[in-house]
Image: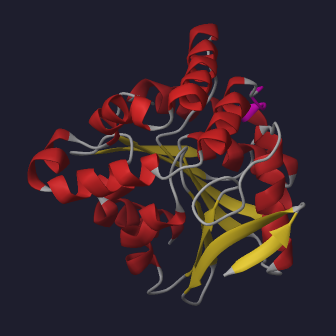
Amino acid sequence: MFLDVNGTQLHYLSEGEGPTIVLLHGLGGTSGVWRGVMDTLTTNHHVVAIDLRGHGRSAPILKPVTIRDFADDVLALLDALELPAVTLVGHSFASLIAQMAAAVRPSSIDNLVLVGAMSWLDPDARDAYIDRAELVEQEGLDSIADAWIASALAPRTHAHSPQLSGLTREMLERNDPASYAHACRAIAKYQPIAHEDLGQPTLLLVGDHDRSTPVAMSEELHAAIPVTRIEVIPSAAHWAMLDQPDWISAKMMTWLL
């Protein structure tokens, strides 16, 4: 399904009935990465998975954007769907979007689930995202694919499910390079919110093999956000919903009871 919000067209999936959970994918991903998680959650929840601006089947990004712009897109879609307060789930760079949305309009977000969460970026990390944007613009997504896929999935997944490794790599390479670069620069420009002001109960999930947003990042958020729980996902790397979808959905269901 598609909706026009904030001057762009967003694609989303909507399945199930019950309290609403909204799923946001990471940089270079699509709503499809949540399929394994959705299949469990829809047994007793209404689940919406969004292709963020510039990703998947949503419209490309045509000008510089900020994390606040992405958050405003999500909130506008919630309004268009006339949803009551939701559980908002954000992976990686979308964890920044989820935190921003929760801070901007707390009345729309009942709970947060942050998977492979980001909290802040040091100068070296900001420079790395700017460098990545320039590389992708000049040489395409193929130029980063080898390093990206190596850290995206856990060693066990690469060994036992090479087909998933191949499909995950293709997902990255099918991104629009200009949109991907705009998203990288949005991350580089991100200014952290006041985490101590987040009032939503927050579940932090992080893979034990996550090299992109290691456990220490989630521990920092665990210390900063007033009501949090942290769970380390076994045999999972940065795209943990692909490595361990059943584990993630079970922890989310228990959290929301």
Is residue 79 placed above or below 255 in the rendered structure?
below
Q: Residue at x 86, y 73 (%)?
A: 79
Q: Residue at x 34, y 40 (%)?
A: 152
Quadrant location of residue 190? top right
Q: Can residue 225 be spotted in the picture? A: no
* In the image: residue 181, left or right of residue 152: right
Q: Position of residue 175 (x, y in %)?
A: 54, 50
| Residue at the extreme bottom of the image, as rendered | 17
* In the image: residue 24, left or right of residue 5: left
The verdict on residue 193 being magenta is: yes
| Residue at the extreme right of the image, as rendered | 7
Q: Position of residue 253 (x, y in %)?
A: 44, 70
* In the image: residue 170, left or right of residue 128: left
| Residue at the extreme front of the image, as rendered | 138
- Quadrant including the N terminus: bottom right
Q: Residue at x 37, y 59 (%)?
A: 248
Instruction: Tell which of 202 and 46 is nearer to you.
Output: 46
Is residue 10 placed above or below 118 in the rendered structure?
below
Instruction: Tell which of 76 and 142 is nearer to you.
Output: 142
Is residue 115 placed above or below 34 in the rendered structure?
above
Is residue 137 placed above or below 230 in the rendered structure?
above
Q: Residue at x 30, y 66 (%)?
A: 246
| Residue at the extreme left of the image, as rendered | 160
**Predominant SS of the magenta segment:** loop
Instruction: Tell which of 167 and 158 is nearer to you.
Output: 167
* In the image: residue 129, left or right of residue 146: right
The verdict on residue 194 being magenta is: yes
State the colouring used for the structure image. secondary structure
Q: Position of residue 49 (x, y in %)?
A: 58, 69
Q: Position of residue 160 (x, y in %)?
A: 10, 53
**What span is in magenta?**
191-195
Q: Can residue 139 be spotted in the picture? A: yes
